[in-house]
Amino acid sequence: MKDGRFLTLGIETSCDETAASVVADGRFVMSNVISSQIDIHTAYGGVVPEIASRKHLERINDVIGKALDDAGVSAKEIDLIGVTYGPGLVGALLIGVAAAKAMAYACDIPLVGVNHMHGHIAANYLEHEELEPPFMALIVSGGHTEIVNVPDYNKCEKLGGTRDDAAGEAFDKVARVIGLGYPGGPKIDKAAKEGDPDSIAFKRVYLEQGSLDFSFSGLKTQALNYLNQERQAGREINVNNVAASFQEAVVEVIADKAVMAAEKYGQNRIVMAGGVASNSRLRALMEEKAGSRGIDVLKPSPVLCTDNGAMIASAAYYAYRSGVKPDLELDAVPGLEF
Amino acid sequence: MPNFSKDMKILAIETTGKYGSASVTDETGGVFSACSSEEMNHLRGMITLIDEALREAGITKDELTHVAASVGPGSFTGIRIGVTTARIMSQMLGIPCIAVSTLEAMACRSLDKAISSGALYVVPVINARRHQTYAGVYEAAFTTDGEHQSAIPVMEEKQYMIEDLLEELKKKLAEHSGAVAFFTGDGIDAYSDIIESTMPEGSFIFADEDLRYQHAESVAVIAHRKADAGETLTYDELIPEYMRLAEAEQRLRAGTLSDRIRKPVKI
């Protein structure tokens, strides 16, 4: 406790960001330290799990130390530690979990494990002071494309998800093939701004009537076939047009389904989360489609969309408050479900 | 048993092999340990083991003066769990770290038995699969005062193909007539056939299973000696000894990383 405020330290190492943050009362970000490994993994065209694990270990102490320093608090003033225990890369997760447990034990602080996906949703509690459940959540990231009903702080009901590639994964693959490189999401977003989204007729995959699931692998194949065909015909490829058309085919389906889910469950708010939630076209389209039906769209600022410790701290705070028991035998669960 | 300095209370962590363990040395020179009975339960069980070892020793975590970790070689995942735990405890408790070589600790664990069995060398061998090992060779000796045994490294700790290790070891043994090597580590489980068919009869002994695997007790003993000698580290200096680059890094350095992966394809 400091100045009557309950302090939570959040630790996140599920993929390629080593992150820690101090959050007061589950809502107010006092520090948010993110050490990205993106420069290292770019040389390999994607995240290399063994290298990510090694880097997390080298950085975790200083990231936690800086999170405490930036917040102006000591370890002894922390009331709760929250750590991502899944889903994610197992070798990466276990650095955060081992560090959190060692700190919890050394400083006598309760520790709770946080589902990374719940963390992404909780990023919105940090951005929007008044936000409380219930609401509909749309999580779009490198590994996830999910629509989740959130009736309460600690309840998440997954209504639909991807049956093959996640949206971010599809962005990465197409970006690589059109020469934009890694990470694909932001690069496609940027190139698309200079392109015409109607120039190439990529299909919209809605699956069965009423389905809230996604499938992007067919679209990806269509894009690859298109590129091959153009190349064989000797026609020059307009990278910006491919990016814009491909992106439009992805985000249109996502926006439509998120709005459909909100209407079906009578929610008048859709909360966006995950790395791809900072895609500018997805944000614009969500506002357009939801707005026309009287549904509000909330989203965290880009820094809270990427993996970070603050969102984990917020989720931990609400989990602890609702009675989740502290656990020093916490294990990493790479395939953790919602 | 070495003479322990009175004011040192060291926590030692060993998670590089199948079974995790934690040991605590107290001011009387006693070593108190807790060992997991579950395989590869390092992450889940580590704090419980540390807590048990401290209780056994009757000291609190705040009384600890050093934290030591077996830093490898061994299971990459295991190494990381132990080293991360030690680094964070060091940072949070404000105490220095000590790095202990896993192979040296394994040699130390077998030293008594090796000497009493008449062996000249102790050879810890960790199975790194596909005929690979992490290994070293130590001479089992007495220190100059004639009282304490010590393991003196005589072949570099590194990654060896099992066949190469045995060839070098045979040369070493040939320098002393009747010299015997005492093998320890899970390399025995993996390569006993190769060892038995390569080494001359009577030139080797296998450690029994109760001594064969990593244990924090010998990590604690070595850590104590290092603490006495002032060989301590800050938490950020405590780094794993993997003895091997990540596979992708090996390929990147060798220039054999697939171009398709490394470079965006230009159309």
Image: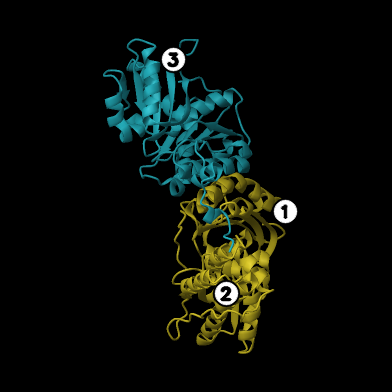
Chain colours: A yellow, B cyan
| Label ID, residue B141 | 3
| Label ID, residue A86 | none
Q: Find out whether the residues at labels 3 and 1 contact each other: C-beta distance under 8 Å.
A: no
The residue under the point 63% across, 89% down is A292
> Which amino acid type corresponds to the residue marked 3 in the rendered image?
Ala
Kindly report the distance in space between the C-alpha atoms of the residues bearing marks 2 and 3. Answer: 70 Å
Vertical relation: B44 (above or below) B266: above
> Which amino acid type corresponds to the residue marked 2 in the rendered image?
Phe
Out of B72 and A254, give the one closest to the viewer.
Answer: A254
Q: Quadrant of residue A240?
A: bottom right
> Which amino acid type corresponds to the residue marked 1 in the rendered image?
Asp
Out of A260 and B146, give the one closest to the viewer.
Answer: A260
Residue B68 visible (yes or no): yes
| Label ID, residue A246 | 2
Please state the chain letter of the residue tagged with numbered disc 2 in the rendered image: A
Kindly report the distance in space between the C-alpha atoms of the residues bearing marks 2 and 1. Answer: 41 Å
Q: Nearer the viewer, mark 3 or mark 1?
A: 3
The residue under the point 58% across, 49% down is A56
Q: Quadrant of residue A20?
A: bottom right
Residue A110 visible (yes or no): no
Kindly report the distance in space between the C-alpha atoms of the residues bearing marks 3 and 1. Answer: 52 Å
| Label ID, residue A70 | 1
Q: Are marks 3 and 1 on the same chain?
A: no
Dot 2 lies on which element? Answer: helix
